[in-house]
Amino acid sequence: MTEEKESRHRHESEAEEVKEILSVVSKELPALVKGILGSVFSEEAGRDLGKAAAAFYKELKSAGLPDEVAVKMTEDYMSTFTSMGDVLKGMGKGGKLGITAKDKDELGKEITLDIQRKIKEKLAEKHRASEDDEEEDDDEDED
Amino acid sequence: MKIQTVVIGGAHLTKLALSLIAAWLTLDWKVRRMRRAFEKQLIRVGMSKKDAQRLSAQFAKLKDNVKNAVKGSMFRIR
């Protein structure tokens, strides 16, 4: 009877824990996602980036660069954001830094072969060392 | 107790899903506003509207990459 009670109590506390976890996740996760998206994609971020790019463009123009070159250089300056996007794109394609499952398999095979080679080398070394020791012992016995 | 947990848990999950869907749907709108603010600053210093739009197009590209990354990670989890 007491076991039944304990089991019931345990189940209830587990259910309570799940409820707590879900309530925290449902509260915190959207806030986190909104915060991340808001820091990258917001009117304020756009304005700040625009100010930075505008200052860069203005400097180039005042230095006497032709309009086309100044625009091209500002575009390159802004392309750092696209490169950040490319990293994300790579992550989306195949995990961290864009390593695909195929790459992982190949890498795994290479590592396995490398380990096998190292083990063979070590064993051969050990075998050679033991043979040398035996030879030395034989020489000593002959003396 | 179990039924109550399932109901409350379901409500939390629904809330979470709705919040994420809302964030997903408002992303386009946020990017549009961001592009407009960005273009405004560039036009103010004398850049042509066409060039400013070309530069701000990178944000749309970034948004697409973010969306693809999220989609990719979702399919990986499955």
Image (spheres, coloured by chain):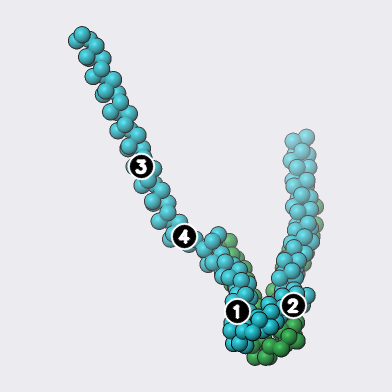
Would residue B60 be visible to someone looking at this image?
Answer: no
Q: In this view of the protein, which residue sits in the foreground, B44 or A30?
A: B44
Name the residue that disc number 3 marks.
A116
Q: B8 above or below B41?
A: above
In the rendered structure, are the residues bearing label 3 and label 4 in contact, judged by CB atoms less than 8 Å apart? no
Label 2, label 3: how far apart the Cα atoms are:
58 Å
Q: Compare marks 4 and 1 and give the one earlier in the sequence.
A: 1
Q: Compare marks 3 and 1 and give the one earlier in the sequence.
A: 1
Task: Report the mark closest to the observer, 3 or 4.
Answer: 3
Label 2, label 4: how far apart the Cα atoms are:
42 Å
In the rendered structure, are the residues bearing label 4 and label 1 in contact, judged by CB atoms less than 8 Å apart? no
Name the residue that disc number 1 marks.
A73
Residues marked 2 and 4, same chain: yes
Would residue A141 be visible to someone looking at this image?
Answer: yes
The residue sitting at the front extreme is: A64
x and y, in percent, of residue B9 in the image: 76, 59
Looking at the rendered structure, the kind of residue marked 3 is Gln
Q: Compare marks 2 and 3 and give the one earlier in the sequence.
A: 2
Among the 4 quarters of the image, the one containing residue A88:
bottom right
Q: Compare marks 2 and 4 and give the one earlier in the sequence.
A: 2
Q: Which chain is cyan?
A: A
Chain B drawing hue: green
